Image (cartoon, helix red, strand yellow):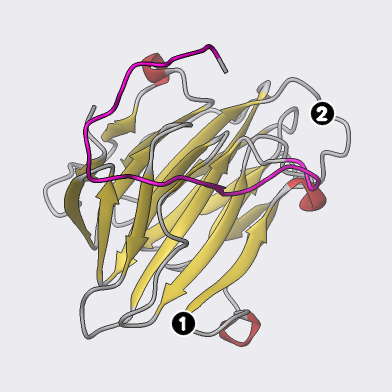
């Protein structure tokens, strides 16, 4: 399992792509990096599509209109709506696709702009971008801004997959007893049940987009605390 998956965009040819999380991994979403230039056909799908704009000005092309986006914007195309995310060869974006079982509450296509005034919290600040309350059925997307020395809760697990897309700075992670670093332009993939914690060990702000796949219900436990003891594990004396 590759938990940290760095990538580059400078050698990406027009109308090309590569997968960061392939559909074969069966985690509820597929993620690829794309460069514009292809003549994609607008169509309605049984899946949601999202795009995080890295370079250039890709567009959300719908049946009746075309909306251009800027770097940093998020494009959202709900399941069942006819459209496509496309752009010229200078446009590069991360495209996410999630399967949707229930379209109840689905909303219209949109472009989400980041509002720097809407971060909540101090050292480990976040800004909600898309989720079930916004009509997104397949995942929850937050933008996180982590000050030097700040970090997530201590060792924990989730009942859902968590994916980080690092925009700026360097994230340090402890995945079980393995320590690793995720620089800008890398994806971190944490399947459900993987013991982890993450923090900013540098002297610069670290910023990343966090995906929760699927979005947990409001009444569920978000972080299950885990204790790692510095001793050998023993056999169960009874089944819990």
Residue 195, position as x, y percentages in the image: 38, 40
Residue 37 numbered mark, or none: none
Q: Mark 2 — residue?
A: 103
Q: Which residues are magenta?
A: 217-239
Number of numbered labels in the structure image: 2
The N terminus, quarter of image: top left
Asked whether residue 108 is drawn in magenta, I would say no
In this orientation, which residue lies closer to the viewer: 26 or 91?
26
Q: In the image, what residue occupies the spot 47% across and 43% down?
A: 162
Between discs 2 and 1, the one toward the N terminus: 2
Seen as rendered, the residue at the extreme front is 237
Q: Residues within 10 Å of mark 1 (few under 14, many from 20)?
A: some
In this orientation, which residue lies closer to the viewer: 74 or 223?
223
Q: In the image, what residue occupies the spot 63% across and 79% down?
A: 120
Residue 134, position as x, y percentages in the image: 78, 52
User: Between tags 2 and 1, which lies in front?
Assistant: 1
Q: In the image, what residue occupies the spot 81% across and 51% down?
A: 133
Asked whether residue 232 is drawn in magenta, I would say yes
Determine whether, in the image, residue 81 is placed left or right of residue 197. right
**Is 164 placed above or below 193 here?**
below
Residue 218, position as x, y percentages in the image: 79, 48
Can you see residue 100? yes
Determine whether, in the image, residue 160 is placed left or right of residue 90. right
Q: Residues within 10 Å of mark 2 (few under 14, many from 20)?
A: some
**Is 221 placed above or below 10 here?**
above
What is the magenta segment's predominant secondary structure?
loop
Q: Mark 1 — residue?
A: 123
Q: In the image, what residue occupies the spot 49% across and 54% down?
A: 210
């Amino acid at each position: 399992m590759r938990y940290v998956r760095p990538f580059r965009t400078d050698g990406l040819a027009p109308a090309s792509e590569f997968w960061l999380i392939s559909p074969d991994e069966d985690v509820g979403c597929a993620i690829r990096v794309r460069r514009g230039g292809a003549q994609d056909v607008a169509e309605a799908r049984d899946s949601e599509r999202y795009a995080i704009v890295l370079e250039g000005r890709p567009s959300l092309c719908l049946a009746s209109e075309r909306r251009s986006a800027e770097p940093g914007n998020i494009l959202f195309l709900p399941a069942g709506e006819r459209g496509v995310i496309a752009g010229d060869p200078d446009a590069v974006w991360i495209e996410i696709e999630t399967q949707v079982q229930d379209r109840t509450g689905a909303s219209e296509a949109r472009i989400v702009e980041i509002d720097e005034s809407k971060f909540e919290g101090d050292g480990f600040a976040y800004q909600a971008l898309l989720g079930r309350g916004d009509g997104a059925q397949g995942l929850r997307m937050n933008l996180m801004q982590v000050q030097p020395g700040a970090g997530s809760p201590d060792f924990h697990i989730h009942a859902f997959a968590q994916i980080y897309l690092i925009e700026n700075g360097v994230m340090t992670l402890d995945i079980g007893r393995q320590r690793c670093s995720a620089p800008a332009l890398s994806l971190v993939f944490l399947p459900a049940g993987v013991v982890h914690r993450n923090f900013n060990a540098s002297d610069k702000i670290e910023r990343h987009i966090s995906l929760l796949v699927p979005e947990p219900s409001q009444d569920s436990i978000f972080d299950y605390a885990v204790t790692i003891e510095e001793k050998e594990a023993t056999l169960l004396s009874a089944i819990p």
